[in-house]
Image (cartoon, rainbow, N blue to C red):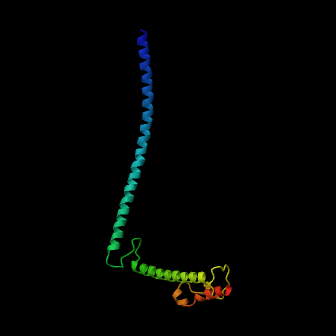
Amino acid sequence: MEFALILDVMISVLLVVTIVYAVVLNRRLKSLRAGEAEMRSAIERFNASAELAEANLARIKDVATSETPSSTFAGGNKPLEPLVAEARHLAADLNLLIERGESVISRTQTAAPSARAVETTAKPLAARDLANPQATWAPGEDLDLADALKGVR
């Protein structure tokens, strides 16, 4: 009889452990199902973003392969031609400024490498028309700084 009682107690304990495990498993499955709805909405948003990106890439390819430079900018109705012309003008201005800066730097390094402070009589930059550098800078105008540096020695 003791053997039957021990066997009944062991089965009861195993049933209690099984019930507890089933409750824990049920809670985890509920949270997984709740997360599934969030995952579905995230996947739908991702798909919408991917479709938008594909459409934009197709537009970019169309603009890049079109024969006419007057096609419109994808973000609005502005034609590309004036934007490209303005960009080329700005690039030319930047190249001019870079060349002038490099020539001034090279001249100051060879003229007075140890000079720290320089007083110049050159025109201040505010007096120049920075919007149109070609109209205001003469080819020899950057020599004012080099002359001032030579006077510091």
The residue lying toward the viewer, choosing from 21 and 120, is 120
Rendering quarter of residue 75: bottom left
The residue lying toward the viewer, choosing from 147 and 85, is 147
The residue drawn where x is 57% and y is 81% is 105
Rendering quarter of residue 49: bottom left
In this rendering, the answer to whether 135 lies above or below 65 is below
The residue drawn where x is 45% and y is 79% is 87
Residue 79 visible, this orientation: no
Quadrant position of the N terminus in the picture: top left
The residue drawn where x is 40% and y is 45% is 36
Residue 34 visible, this orientation: yes
The spot of residue 106 in percent (x, y) is: 56, 82
The spot of residue 61 in percent (x, y) is: 34, 70
In this rendering, the answer to whether 29 lies above or below 57 is above
The spot of residue 3 in percent (x, y) is: 41, 11
The residue lying toward the viewer, choosing from 94 and 44, is 94
